[in-house]
Image: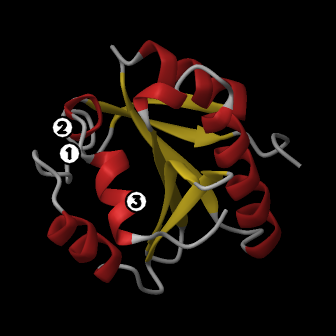
Amino acid sequence: MLTLDVTALQRLTNDPSITNVVHFLPTPFTERDALELLGTQNENNCFLGAWRNEDLIGVVGIHLHGEDFLEIGYWIGTRFQGQGYAYEAASAVIAELKRLYRTLEITAECRLENAASWKLLQKLGFRSTGERGHRPGRELLVMRHASIR
């Protein structure tokens, strides 16, 4: 995981298959949008790049919600999907979060119809709470404590 580059972030993210499912990403996703997204990084929000050689292949976001829980989210470039990169990137971030924030619950939100992401979150050790998420059309999942070491 490395820091994000504005141009690489714009190229990866300017894809309707990504911007249509990540609620805060505009379509088209411009370099200005990439710069603004990176400008939102602070102690409560962090976006990490997943790189393969010189290519940005995905993004993992970490969002601190109060003092109780962290949320992760991610997107992977279309041509890199289905190759295990999302699992590799998300599991690395989760392992580090568990090391740094032992007492905070880790959550994620997913649309029920997003079968690939739902399967990935379950593989990572998340379980559905049966509750609606904060974002439209999403369900809340929580990390099982024994997962990802």
**Crowdedness near tag 2: few (<14), some (14–19) or many (≥20) residues, C-alpha within 10 Å:** few
Residue that label 3 marks: 8
Q: Amino acid at mark 2?
A: Pro
Marks 1 and 2 in Cβ contact (< 8 Å)? yes
Mark closer to the observer (1, 3): 3
Separation of disc 1 and disc 3 at Cα?
20 Å
How many labels, in total? 3
Q: Residue at x 52, y 25 (%)?
A: 81
Going from N to C along the chain, the mark reached first, 1 or 2, is: 1
- The image quarter containing residue 109 is top left
Residue placed furthest toward the front: 54
Mark closer to the observer (2, 3): 3
Numbered mark located on residue 142 in the image:
none
Going from N to C along the chain, the mark reached first, 2 or 3, is: 3
Q: Residue at x 73, y 45 (%)?
A: 91
Q: Amino acid at mark 1?
A: His
Colouring mode (rainbow / by chain / secondary structure / one colour): secondary structure
Residue placed furthest toward the right: 149
